[in-house]
Amino acid sequence: KQEVTQIPAALSVPEGENLVLNCSFTDSAIYNLQWFRQDPGKGLTSLLLIQSSQREQTSGRLNASLDKSSGRSTLYIAASQPGDSATYLCAVSGNYGQNFVFGPGTRLSVLP
Amino acid sequence: DGGITQSPKYLFRKEGQNVTLSCEQNLNHDAMYWYRQDPGQGLRLIYYSQIVNDFQKGDIAEGYSVSREKKESFPLTVTSAQKNPTAFYLCASTPGIEAFFGQGTRLTVV
């Protein structure tokens, strides 16, 4: 059974720092990996999608990498801003029937 | 505007009452999902549907029911059999690769 973990569970950094969020999965036979942002009381907003044949994706200050063989993905946020404060979740899809398995998330606080 | 609409945003349920959460999408996606989110926990799958008139139980289906009579709609009913329904409920859809989410419904038992 696919399991997804995220480290750290929470992170607090001063504004301007570069930071890395980690996502690990136990079954490397995935179709793709998706990173989401969730603001308090809101739904999930898709940030980046990495398909299984890709190694990384970039969008603005965000860069996500995928290493299927080791079961890991990292989300790199450059020059963090207070507006980046949110919970970040990763999810993998594969041949699991229900398609998506989510990690518990990393709660990020960027202090001004 | 294309997207997923969940309603209502807030819902209050009395003990022993059934309530229905609405999820509508105009993205023409075949697959739709319902997830439950509790504080400090990840998303847990309740039900999913890959096609109209077909749906499958997820990890925590007990006390919930769904229907999929139209491609655009996937309502979730929280029955009186669900003993701890207070949670944040999220609906999602996908064309097969990328998942898209609604804004959620917060259900509270009063």
Image (cartoon, grey):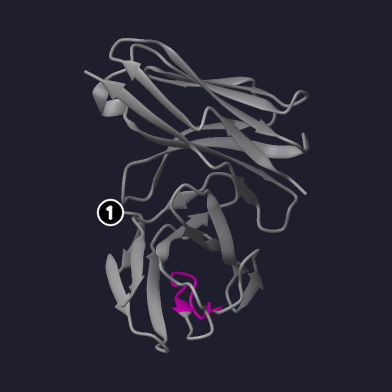
Packing grade of label 1 (10 A; few <14, some 14-19, many >=20) is: few
Q: Is residue B55 left or right of residue B77?
A: right
Image: A107 above or below B23: above
Instruction: Specify whether B45 is left or right of B28.
Output: right
Instruction: Single out the residue that lies furthest toward the bottom.
Output: B16
What type is the residue that disc 1 sits on?
Answer: Asp
Q: Chain of mark 1?
A: B
Whether residue B8 is visible to the viewer of this picture, yes or no, is: no
Q: Residue at x 31, y 51 (%)?
A: A41
Residue A45, picture quadrant: top left
> Eyeballing the image, is B94 above or below A89?
below
- Secondary structure state at the residue bearing disc 1: loop
Indicate whether residue B69 is drawn in magenta: yes
Question: Is residue A60 found left or right of B94 in the rendered image?
Answer: left
- Give the x, y percent position of residue A82: 25, 23
Q: Residue at x 28, y 54 (%)?
A: B1
Image location of residue B41, percent across then percent down: 51, 49
* Residue A64, placed above or below residue B18: above
The residue that label 1 is drawn on is B1
Query: Which percent across, then down, holds residue B77?
Result: 46, 80
At x 65% / y 71%, what residue is drawn?
A: B57
Q: Magenta stretch containing residue A70, yes or no?
A: no
Front-lying residue, B26 or B108 = B108
- What residue range appears in magenta? B64-77
Q: Main secondary structure of the magenta part?
A: loop
Judge whether residue A21 can be spotted in this image.
yes
Considering only vertical position in the picture, is B80 above or below B43? below
Estimate the x, y position of residue B33 in percent, counting from the top left: 53, 62
